[in-house]
Every structure is written in structure tokens, then in C-alpha cells.
Amino acid sequence: MTSNANDTLDHIDEQRFLEAIDLASIDFTPAFVHGLLTAYCCEDERSHEWAIMLSEDIDPDNKTLTAQLRYLNQAKNVIGAQLADSELGFQLLLNNTAHTLHDEVLLTREWASGFLLGAEAIGLAERVAHDDLSSEFLADLPQITAMPLPDDDALDTASIADEYSDNYDSSDDVYDEDTGDDTRNDILQIQEYCRAGAIGVFLARWKE
């Protein structure tokens, strides 16, 4: 797979990213793909093994597929630049503007699963074994990918956009102290842990 030198990106448009995955008939979520590409930023940039992991049957005559994979390769380059940014501008691509708590947890698991798959494929744990924090982050990923999903019936009616600010259960007309606020804060902390962990692993990999 080759890249057009004139076809470069300076940011990732979430809608375009989703479109590329859809047009390439990739059976993974955008969050998973972003996690995988993030991990592969810790591999030689000439490696395109990630493309094979996303689409096993790559037909060079399939212009639609090759065009979308070319776009994703450009997106990976953007991710790498974000990871190397001294201002720590890297963010997880979770498309979490209006999701339920259930979706928020699921997307976080998906991103972590993609990163973990990529990390295992390139032997990342061995490459950053000299850095204790990076090793700890990679060891924590399996647990993050297995986080339990919130109860649909209890939480899916509330939107992340509302931030569960009311803590109000209309079914029994009482305030419920065990609704989504604490869980959402936990998820935000885990997302930040993944964001910081990815940056740390990237820096440890290339500054070994």
C-alpha cells in the first residue's frame, strides 16, 4: 500500500474516519481501529501489518478499499504526530458527544481492545519493558477491555451529554445516589488513563 505525498492530513475528521471504515467494509468500530492504529505508531512506519489485521483480503485492484486504507494510513501518521506533541494533544477517538453511559463504557473497551491487539502483535511489552509505567499500563489493558457494561435498563435512558446531573429516579420519586455520576467519573478517569498511557508508551518506545 502506498501513500500519495500530496494527500496528507493535519487532523482526523471523525465522520471521514467512520466513512473510511464503512467503505472498506472493516468489521471493527472506529474506537477499535483508532486504538489499533495508535499502537502501531510504536512500530516502524513502513509496516502495514495493521491493514491486514483490519482487512485480511486486500485486493490491490479494489480501488475503494485501497483508497480507504491509504486514508487510514494518513490518519495513523496524524495519531503519531499527536502522540509526539509536546503539548500532549493526543485524544482517544470515541465519538462520545451524545452517548449513554453504556456506550461510553463500550467505546472505551473497544479502544483498549484495539490498542491491546496492536501492542501484542508488535511485541510492544518487550520494547518498553525498561519503563515501569508503560509496563503497568499494558498489564492493565486486559482488565480495561473486560470492564462490565452498565445495566441497560438502569442507565441507558440517561445521556452522557446530560452528565447525569439530576441523579433522579422518577420511578419511585426519590433521589438515587447510586446512579451514573460516579460510574461516569470512573470511566472518564479510565479514558484519561488510556490517553496518558498511550502517550507514555509511545515516548518510552522511541526514547528507549
Image (cartoon, rainbow, N blue to C red):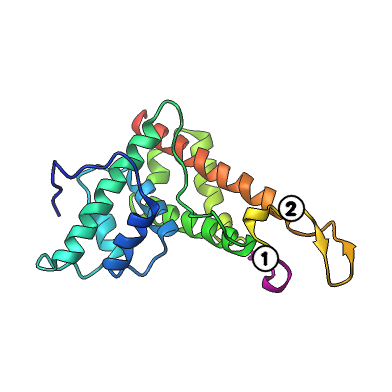
Badge 2 amino acid: Asp
Where residue 19 sits, quadrant-wise, is bottom left
Q: Callout 2: helix, strand or loop?
A: helix
* Distance from Cα at disc 2 to Cα at disc 1: 12 Å
Above-or-below relation of 87 to 106? above
Q: What's the residue at 45%, 27% (across, down)?
A: 87
**Numbered disc in front, either 2 or 1:** 2
Tell me how many marks there are: 2
Considering every residue shown, the one lying at the far left of the view is 61
- What residue does disc 2 label? 181
- What residue does disc 1 label? 150
Q: What's the residue at 34%, 32% (across, down)?
A: 206
The crowd level at tag 2 (other Cα within 10 Å; few <14, some 14-19, many 20+) is: some
Badge 1 amino acid: Pro
* Horizontal and vertical percent position of residue 108: 54, 55
| Magenta-colored span | 148-157
Is residue 49 among what the camera can see?
yes
The crowd level at tag 1 (other Cα within 10 Å; few <14, some 14-19, many 20+) is: some
Where residue 42 sits, quadrant-wise, is top left
Is residue 129 among what the camera can see?
no
Of 121 and 151, nearer the camera is 151
* Horizontal and vertical percent position of residue 75: 30, 47
Above-or-below relation of 122 to 62? above
Of 19 and 148, nearer the camera is 19
Of 95 and 25, nearer the camera is 95
What main secondary structure does the magenta stretch of the protein show? loop
